[in-house]
């Protein structure tokens, strides 16, 4: 099925370890986004890529980096994981313009940092 | 900067009763408005969206929402709730460069039989 694919679905890291979360979409969307979800806080934007070749910081970028590898793929990297980064991470993509504008979300990555 | 407030953290309704989930937004221009639903352990699914035009929008699963500019609100409604509607609901506003979505904190809906 067409959509947004995230890998891995679950991950446990030790403090200080690094990892990359992968995201790919096959809907030919221009824009892609990474959010984290924490209880009672909704979803908060980490980084986004409005179009291929551009990336920008969101609300909570500290401790993360991103790469827009091509139009389909947008990865999120934790260089030195901290327990505060324990969260559920969602990737999303969107067509840029109404009326097609609207996010399609991946199924999420549940990350635990111990 | 835009923001979204969902005043109710938890709501419990009886099966078959009507439902209204509140959402207030802050944004200087005409916003793009969305409602998403998330079942436990799942991703987010789009229920409905508003861009312009008719202020009453219909979505999937029998949901509708009404945009009221004067009240900066976009409340979600359903005439008769089913047990399968139990989930967390998020209101979001989109605007600005990159059309980033800003989400509310969510409202958890419980349905009692």
Image: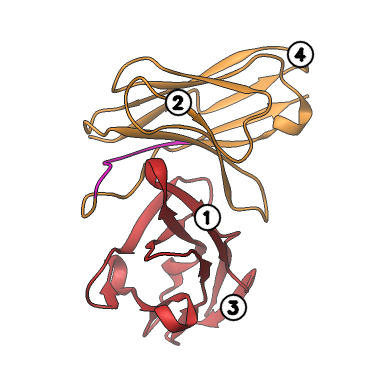
Q: CA distance from mark 2 to mark 4?
A: 25 Å
Q: CA distance from mark 3 to mark 1?
A: 22 Å
**Label 1 vs label 2, nearer the camera:** 2
Most foreground residue, A23 or B39: A23
Q: Is residue B15 visible?
A: no
Q: What percent of the width, then of the height, locates residue B69? A: 41, 78
> From the viewer's perspective, is residue A1 above or below residue B29?
above
Give the residue at x 70% y 33%: A86
Q: Please determine if labels 4 and 1 lie on a single subunit.
A: no
Q: What percent of the width, then of the height, locates residue A35? A: 53, 39
Residue under label 2: A55
Q: Mark 3 falls on what kind of element? A: strand
- Looking at marks 2 and 4 on the same chain, the residue that comes earlier in the sequence is marked by 4
Q: Please determine if labels 2 and 3 lie on a single subunit.
A: no
State left or right for residue A27 relative to residue B82.
Answer: left
Disc 1: CA contacts within 10 A as few (<14), some (14-19) or many (>=20): many
Q: Mark 2 falls on what kind of element? A: loop
**Label 4 vs label 3, nearer the camera:** 4
Q: Please determine if labels 2 and 4 lie on a single subunit.
A: yes
- Chain letter of disc 2? A
Q: Which residues are magenta?
A: A91-97
Q: Is residue B100 part of the magenta span, yes or no?
A: no
Give the residue at x 35% y 21%: A73
Residue under label 1: B103
**Label 2 vs label 4, nearer the camera:** 2
Disc 4: CA contacts within 10 A as few (<14), some (14-19) or many (>=20): some
Q: Which mark is residue B12?
A: 3
Viewport quadrant of the N terminus of chain A: top left
């Amino acid at each position: 099925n067409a959509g947004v694919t995230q890998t891995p679905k679950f991950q446990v890291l030790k403090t200080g370890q690094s990892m990359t979360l992968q995201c790919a979409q096959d809907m030919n969307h221009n824009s892609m986004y990474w959010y984290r979800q924490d209880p009672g806080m909704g979803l908060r934007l980490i980084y986004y890529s409005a179009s291929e070749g551009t990336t920008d910081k969101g609300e909570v970028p500290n401790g993360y980096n991103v790469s827009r590898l091509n139009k389909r793929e947008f990865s999120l990297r934790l260089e030195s994981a901290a327990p505060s980064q324990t969260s559920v991470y969602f990737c999303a993509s969107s067509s840029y313009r109404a009326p097609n504008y609207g996010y399609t979300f991946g199924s999420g990555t549940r990350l635990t940092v111990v | 900067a835009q923001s979204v407030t969902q005043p109710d953290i938890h709501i419990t309704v009886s099966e078959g009763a009507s439902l209204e989930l509140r959402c207030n937004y802050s944004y200087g221009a005409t916003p793009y408005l969305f409602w998403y639903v998330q079942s436990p352990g799942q991703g987010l699914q789009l229920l409905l969206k508003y861009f312009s035009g008719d202020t009453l929008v219909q979505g999937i699963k029998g949901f509708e929402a009404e945009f009221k500019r004067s009240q900066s609100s976009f409340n979600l409604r359903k005439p008769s709730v089913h047990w399968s509607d139990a989930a967390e609901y998020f209101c979001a506003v989109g605007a600005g460069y990159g059309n980033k979505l800003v989400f509310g904190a969510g409202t958890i809906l419980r349905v009692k039989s």
